[in-house]
Image (cartoon, helix red, strand yellow):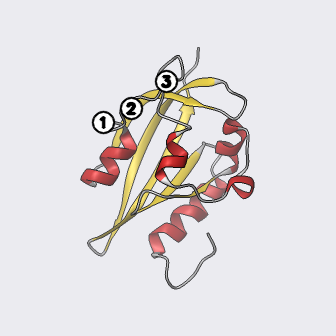
Amino acid sequence: MAASAQQPLDLILARNLMSVLETPSFLVDNDGQMVFFNEAAGDMLGKRFEEIGRLSREEWNAIGPVDAEGEPVSNDKMPLAVALRDGKPAHGRFHICTDQDKIVEVETSAVPLVSGGDFHGAMVVFWPVAS
């Protein structure tokens, strides 16, 4: 996601912040398209953002949320869905699938990005739950 005049400033700033965080994080735009994830997220997922690029909502739903057996679960109440739909911060726990076909339980917090009264997307941070 190169900085351009067409992108809202809050998406640009969120990406800059996430790029220096050691906590796995990803960024979605107001259409729900994943537009960036940081190196820590790439380490956890098994691929770097540069290898995958932007993902549609359907494409990144293959990563999660899933149950402990890897079966998709309804995401209506998941943190990102709440942030995108209701414009409210949310937190939750669920599982994701990594590129190595591992299922990992994660804690997740999603924060909507709103500036000037306009909704631009959400920033999500997640971390594995200690087993």
The image shows residue 9 at horizontal and vertical percentages of 47, 75
Seen from the viewer's position, the closer of residues 88 and 68 is 68
Q: Which residue is mark 1?
A: 77
Q: Is residue 127 above or below residue 58?
A: above
Left or right of 83: which side holds 66? right
Earlier sequence position, callout 3 versus callout 1: 3
Q: Residue at x 73, y 58 (%)?
A: 50
Residue 89 appears in the rendering: no
Secondary element at image label 1: loop
User: Mark 1 belongs to which amino acid?
Assistant: Lys
Label disc, if present, on residue 71 of the rendered structure: 3
- Name which of mark 2 and mark 1 comes first in the sequence: 1
Q: Are marks 3 and 2 in contact (CB under 8 Å)?
A: no
User: Which label's residue is closer to the chain start, 3 or 2?
Assistant: 3
What's the residue at 73%, 29% (across, down)?
Answer: 100
Query: In the image, what residue type sits under mark 3?
Result: Glu
Q: Indicate the amino acid at tag 2.
A: Gly
| Mark 2 Cα-neighbour bin, 10 Å: few <14, some 14–19, many ≥20 | some
Q: Which residue is mark 2?
A: 92
Image side of residue 54 versus residue 116, left or right = right
Q: Is residue 16 visible?
A: yes
